Amino acid sequence: MKIRTGQGIDFHRLEKGRALWLGGVNIPSDKGCVAHSDGDVLLHAICDALLGAAGLRDIGFHFPDTSNEFRNIDSKILLGRSYEMIRGKGFHVVNIDSTVCLERPKISPFIPEMRSVIAGITGTDPDDVSIKATTTEEMGFTGRGEGVVAIASVLLRQ
Ligand SMILES: [Zn+2]
């Protein structure tokens, strides 16, 4: 059995009056991500980890932010397409681990729903999808609420 690991990282600016999407879930917040798509930083990091593990370049290569096709697109569609691409190379997801770095709001209550959304798209069990939350203790751009970061790693088997 061939196994492959991949990692992904994504950043988005936060602005007042925008919807905050994280892990495919809409989270009540006075600020949301500025992006060409819905700005779901966690799903974008997971897409990049999946694509990277399979040697399939990155999210910007497959879903360019210059294309109207992807304007305001639901990132669950991008994750689904990334998953189809790795399946096309015969890979299955073993597990996903991820961390979201955001000062506020607290995302902990939404993590169970995010895990089941991501598991549903990637052919895994919610137990195989880990989402952790952290802050930078008010330091830097995340600490000032100017942006959000997500990091993901995945393991694939072929
Ligand atoms: Zn992104």
Image: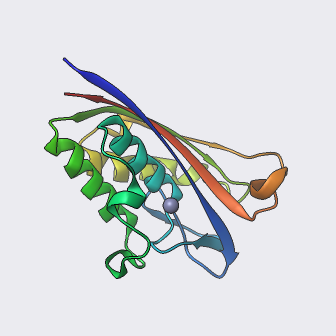
Residue 64 in the image: x percent, y percent? Answer: 39, 68
For the point 20% across and 51% down, the residue is: 84
Quadrant assignment, res 33: bottom right
Residue 98 in the image: x percent, y percent? Answer: 51, 40
Q: Quadrant of the N terminus?
A: top left
Residue 53 in the image: x percent, y percent? Answer: 35, 35
For the point 68% across and 54% down, the residue is: 102
Name the outermost residue toward the top: 1
Q: Quadrant of the C terminus?
A: top left
**Which of 6 and 115 lies nearest the eye of the viewer?**
6
**Which of 127 and 89 lies nearest the eye of the viewer?**
89
For the point 32% across and 45% down, the residue is: 119
Residue 2 in the image: x percent, y percent? Answer: 22, 20
From the viewer's perspective, is residue 30 above or below residue 78? below
Residue 30 at least partly seen: no
From the viewer's perspective, is residue 11 above or below residue 154? below
